Amino acid sequence: MGGTDRTGLRSRHSTHTQRGPTRTCVGCRGTDSWSGLLRVVAVEGEHGFVLTPDPRHRLPGRGAWLHPSRSCLDLALRRRAFPRALRVTAAVDSAVLVEYLGAMTEVESETETESGFDADEHPMSTQR
Ligand SMILES: [Zn+2]
C-alpha cells in the first residue's frame, strides 16, 4: 500500500471558497453567504403581495435575503425592509413567512409528545 497522500487536493480549493457570493440580510443587515440566508420573494395574491419563502431559489422576480430566524424577521418587518428590497409599493403580507419561520423554530417543543397514552387511540370513541 502507500501512495495515499492527498496533500495535492488542498491547493485546488484555495481560490474557490465554499462561501460563494455574499448577500445582505434585510433584518440585521449583516452579510452572509447566500446559502446561509433564506430567499424571500413577493408573490402577488388577491389581497396584495404575499411574502413567500423560497428556499430552493425557484421563484422568479426580485428576492430579499433574510437569516432564517425570528429576530431577523422581526427587524425586517419593523423596518419595512421587505417592500423596499422587493420594490413593492403596496402592503405585503408576512403571515406565510412568519408561519414558515415559526415552524422552523418550534421543532424543539415537539419532543414533548411522549408515549404516555395507555387508553385506546381513538379520541372519538366516546361517541355512541
Ligand atoms: Zn440577519
Image (cartoon, helix red, strand yellow):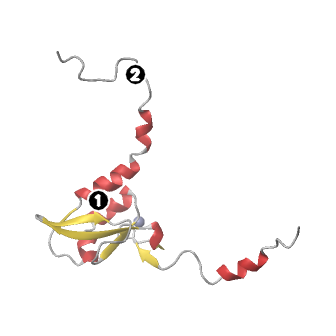
Q: Quadrant of ligand 1?
A: bottom left
Q: Amino acid at mark 2?
A: Phe
Is disc 1 placed on a helix, strand or loop? helix
Q: In the rendered image, which quarter contains the N terminus? A: bottom right
Beta carbon of the mark 2 residue lies under 8 A of ligand 1: no
Q: In the image, is 77 to the left or to the right of 25?
A: left
Front residue of 120/112: it is: 120
Q: Which amino acid lies under the numbered mark 1 shown in the image of this protein?
A: Leu
Query: Residue 126, located in which quarter of the rendered image?
Result: top left
Q: Relative to residue 58, is residue 42 drawn left or right?
A: left
Could you say which disc has been placed on residue 97 in the image? 1
- Indicate whether 52 appears above or below 83: above
**In the rendered view, would you say 75 is above or below 83?**
above
In the rendering, at what x and y percent does residue 65 appear?
Answer: 37, 71
Residue 40: % across, % down: 32, 68
Q: Which quadrant is the C terminus positioned in?
A: top left
